[in-house]
Amino acid sequence: QPFSEGGGTDKWLRAIVPFLEKYLGGDVTIVVTHMKGESGTLGANEFATRDPDGLTLLVSSGSNALPYVLGQEKVQYDFADFSGIIGSPVGGVIYTSPNTGITGMADLCNSDAELIFGGIAATGLDMVPLVAFDLMGLEFTPDMTYDGRSAAREAFVQGATNLDLQTTPGYLQNVQPFTYNLVEAGASVPLFTFGVLDADGNISDDPVFAEMPNIQEAIEICGGSTSGPEFEAFKAAFTAGFGAQKNLW
């Protein structure tokens, strides 16, 4: 597992491990190990370059897919060489701190608050919200110094950032409302979801968070364009990052 413990990828993997063990049979035990570093590239490279033993699996996320699509030199893995086992779209939520004075999307579009977004890598999954923020016309400071979503979430809780992304598994378990009770305690303001791709390849509402605007609607609320080359570039990053966000190889 190429990311830190407690993040969305870790939650997704641990949710399916009992089913893998059950249906593999023969008293199979799956041990989850973490090899974080280089925005998830380190662990994926290790999986790709080790001698195959038939006993090792890799879970990947959009943070692995986008550097691969971009052809970054640090990427030593090729998904075409892997055997896919499970793939699923996984959404996410952008939320902010009430200390910003923001209570919803309309406030975000017109906010004068000093917004600080905590992320992992501008060329990983964070590319999707970063480009979306640009299309919205937001003024914000990106802080790409965190080694995983859980670390970025801790920074939000401690007040080092005030704009955060959590994928759906991490958001449901760690933000709404169990671990930190951020939403119930009024310490978090959900803004928009990333939505899902429908059968025609269009961005539609996330069924998990149907009451929130999806990322395309959020861009439109702020007066941003959802046509033209900039939006098509954004949509390509969205498709690579969220279309099949978690995969087991």
Image (cartoon, helix red, strand yellow):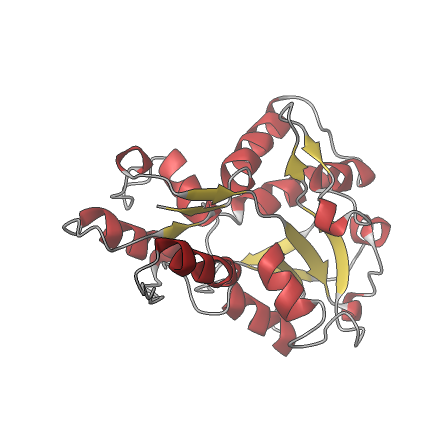
- Does residue 36 appear to the left or right of 128 in the view shown? left
Residue most extreme to the left: 51
Q: Residue at x 28, y 46 (%)?
A: 74
Q: Whole-percent x and y of residue 10?
A: 47, 62
The vertical placement of 211 against 225, above or below, is below
Compared to 235, does 229 lie above or below? above
Question: Residue most toward the front?
Answer: 26
Give the x, y percent position of residue 79: 32, 37
Q: What x and y, as percent, mark residue 47?
A: 25, 52
Q: Is residue 163 left or right of residue 101?
A: left
Q: Position of residue 229 (x, y in %)?
A: 60, 23
Left or right of residue 171, residue 112 in this image = right
Which residue is at the front of the view, 102 or 55?
Answer: 55
Quadrant location of residue 32?
A: bottom left
Residue 38, image quadrant: bottom left
Name the residue: 85% across, 60% down: 103
Visible residue check, residue 83: yes
Quick check: can you spot residue 167?
Answer: no
